[in-house]
Image (cartoon, rainbow, N blue to C red):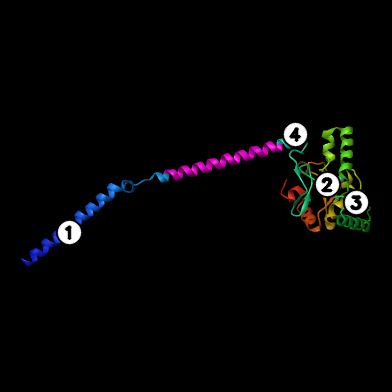
Amino acid sequence: MHKKRRVKRKVIVVFVLLILIGLSVGIYCFFDTEKISFDFSFLNQSVKNTKEKIEEEEAKQKKEEEQKKKEEEEALLDNGYGKEIPGPTYIKGILIVNKTYSLPDGFATGNDPTALAALRELQSGANQAGYSIPLLSGFRSHQKQIELYNRYVARDGKDAADTYSARPGHSEHETGLTFDIGAVDDNYGETAPGKWLASHAHEYGFIIRYPKGKEHITKYQYEPWHVRYVGVEHATKIYENQLTLEEYLGIA
Ligand SMILES: [Zn+2]
């Protein structure tokens, strides 16, 4: 008797518990059906987002490439000048002047004293090696460059003049850091002093600014007589790695 009652009580307790669980689940489902049915759409969404992102990135890259190509084409159209970046612009602490990077009128008023002192050292080094490397042309004012460029354009036409003479504001001679030395002669690099200059200029902080075979980068013909002062450390790195200043500064 006693045993039977205990079993009966247990059955009732289990039964009540089952009903309670059933009710709870029922109420839960009733109020929150979304949580019960599993929603996998977020996975699709994430795949979609990734795909869209890749497509967006690709479209952006394509646009940038097209823009770059367009700028290059435009630059070529204007004999390498294209879009001007007004200066003075310094990269790695080096003043850059070329067909893109320009200088304002009156940036310098004469030869840079440090560059000139380095040139005197170079000339004395050349003398000791048995060569004479005279200074032919150094600082040029904006006004002087205007006159010079216009004279060349009148003589040879703009396209030809652009290969050997800078437009005003774009000449390195306006920096006071540049010298034409030895002889303004395409074959100067083949002469003994020209060869000495090419292999020793860096020891005095100078680089041959427009080297042979790099015309497509510098946008100038080979000028074995045109040296630019950048300091011994930079000049040595540029010389040893056979770079142009544009390549060295990462703007080629
Ligand atoms: Zn020059």
Assess whether residue 48 is covered by the magenta stretch: yes
Q: Position of residue 23 (x, y in %)?
A: 22, 52
Callout 1 touching callout 3 (CB < 8 Å) = no
User: Helix, strand, or loop for circle 2?
Assistant: helix
Question: Mark 2 or mark 4, which has the lower sequence index?
Answer: 4
Specify the farthest residue to the left: 1
Amino acid type of the residue tagged 3 in the rendering: Pro
Find disc 1 in the rendering and name its residue: 14
**Going 48% across and 43% down the picture, which residue do you hit?**
49
Question: Mark 3 or mark 2, which has the lower sequence index?
Answer: 2
**Going 87% across and 39% down the picture, which residue do you hit?**
146
Find disc 2 in the rendering and name its residue: 172
Q: CA distance from mark 4 to mark 3?
A: 37 Å
Q: Is mark 2 within 8 Å of ligand 1?
A: yes
Q: CA distance from mark 4 to mark 1?
A: 91 Å
User: Helix, strand, or loop for circle 3?
Assistant: helix
State which quadrant residue 69 falls in.
top right
Q: CA distance from mark 1 to mark 3?
A: 110 Å
Callout 2 touching callout 1 (CB < 8 Å) = no
1 vs 3, front mark: 1
Magenta extent: 44-72
Question: Mark 4 or mark 1, which has the lower sequence index?
Answer: 1
Compared across the picture, whether 147 is left or right of 94 comes to: right
Q: CA distance from mark 2 to mark 4?
A: 22 Å
Amino acid type of the residue tagged 4 in the rendering: Leu
Callout 4 touching callout 3 (CB < 8 Å) = no
Specify the label residue 193 is tagged with.
Answer: 3
Compared across the picture, whether 141 is left or right of 50 comes to: right
